[in-house]
Amino acid sequence: MYNACMAVALQIRDVPDEVRDFIAERAAQQGKSMQAYLLDLLRREARVAANVALFEKTAAARVVVPAELSPERIIRQGRDGGFSIDRDGTT
């Protein structure tokens, strides 16, 4: 993803005043400097991008679970009618 040991300086030009003010306000609300706030945003974006890439990489390996095996349906069946193990008293 990224190497936390290496640091590089970034500069963003032509930031509109209202965007700068918003960032300063959000940073202050979180008790952070603008630099710390923006670094957290960049780190979060990098993690999300890495997660998306992993999700896409594993897409071909996913299987479709039949509706009758969905967790919701199994739980509802147990709540509504009990399972056979509950009804006949055997384990």
Image (cartoon, grey):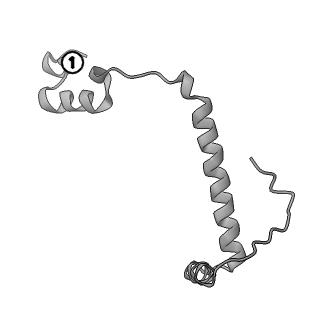
Q: Is residue 48 above or below residue 19?
A: above
Q: Residue 73: x and y, percent?
A: 24, 29
Identify the image quadrant of residue 35. bottom right
Question: From the image, which quarter does the C terminus lie in?
Answer: top left
Determine which residue is flagged by label 1. Answer: 85
Dot 1 surroundings within 10 Å: few (below 14), some, or many (20 or more)?
few
The residue closer to the viewer here, 87 or 7, is 7
Q: Residue at x 20, y 15 (%)?
A: 90
Image coords of residue 78 (percent x, y): 20, 28
Q: Quadrant of residue 56?
A: top right
Horizontal side, residue 65 vs residue 48: left or right:
left
Q: Please, what secondary structure does the residue beneath circle 1 have?
A: helix
Number of numbered discs on residues: 1
Q: Residue 59 location in percent, x, y?
A: 55, 28
Residue type for callout 1: Ile
Q: Is residue 78 left or right of residue 8?
A: left
Image position of 15 with respect to 53: above or below: below
The residue that appears at 18% across and 22% down in the rendered structure is: 86
Image spot of residue 50 (x, y percent)? 66, 45
Query: For this view, does 83 lie left or right of residue 67?
Result: left
